[in-house]
Amino acid sequence: MTEQTPPAEQARPWVPAFPGQRPPFQPGHTLSTTHAAYSPRKVEPLAAELVGLVLADDAIPYLREPSYRPALWAWGRAEARVQLLAEHLAEHEAAGCRSCEKCARWDEQLRKWESAAGTHRGRLGLDPLSRARLGKDLASAQVDMARLLAGLDGEKENPGG
């Protein structure tokens, strides 16, 4: 159940208690957001867009299997954070900053998330090398399965050996 403001408080306008006091923050404000890389309000829609692009790609249909969803979303969120941090750093540098402490921290976070995104890409087969390795592993597993099935068929035809 949601709390509602009593009608007496709804009608009363806000009055500052001292000169220069800010009015209360309204629901949905972005004033306390320093950058969007950790804001679900910014990360989730971008991650959803990235995941949607991957799911629509006919070259990687295996990622549509439900068992891949958690890993795919982890990748999407990491990629979204990379994009948002990179954009934020670029805006900060465009405003004239070249090497402040904030930039150094954001750059460190950017490297961390780029590494995480790269790891997720590799695990999902979203880069050429990892996709080739997954293809090789899949082909090898199919050959092993064919040999196993051929061996079982041979035992049925010649049970005494």
Image (tube, helix red, strand yellow):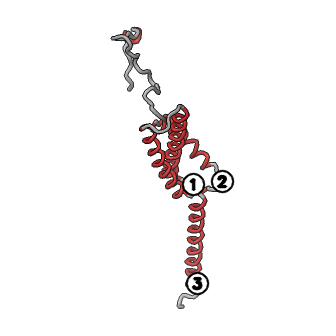
- Kind of residue sitting beneath label 3: Gly
95 to 105, vertically: above or below: above
The answer to which quarter of the image holds residue 141 is bottom right
Give whichever of discs 1 and 3 has the lower sequence position. 1
Give whichever of discs 3 and 2 has the lower sequence position. 2
Mark yes or no: residue 44 visible. no
Q: Residues within 10 Å of mark 3 (few under 14, many from 20)?
A: few
Q: Nearer the viewer, mark 3 or mark 2?
A: 2
- Secondary-structure class at tag 2: loop
3D distance between C-alphas at marks 3 and 2: 38 Å
Residue found at the very far left of the displayed protein: 17
- Tell me the residue that label 3 is attached to: 154
Q: Nearer the viewer, mark 1 or mark 3?
A: 1
Mark yes or no: residue 6 visible. yes
x and y percentages locating residue 36 in the rendered image:
48, 35
x and y percentages locating residue 31 in the rendered image:
45, 26
Q: Which mark is residue 58?
A: 2
- The total of numbered circles placed on residues is 3
Looking at the rendered image, the quarter that the N terminus falls into is: top left
Residue sitting at x 52%, y 39%: 84
Looking at the rendered image, the quarter that the C terminus falls into is: bottom right
3D distance between C-alphas at marks 1 and 2: 10 Å
- Tell me the residue that label 1 is attached to: 63
Q: Is 93 in front, or is 47?
A: 93
- Kind of residue sitting beneath label 2: Asp
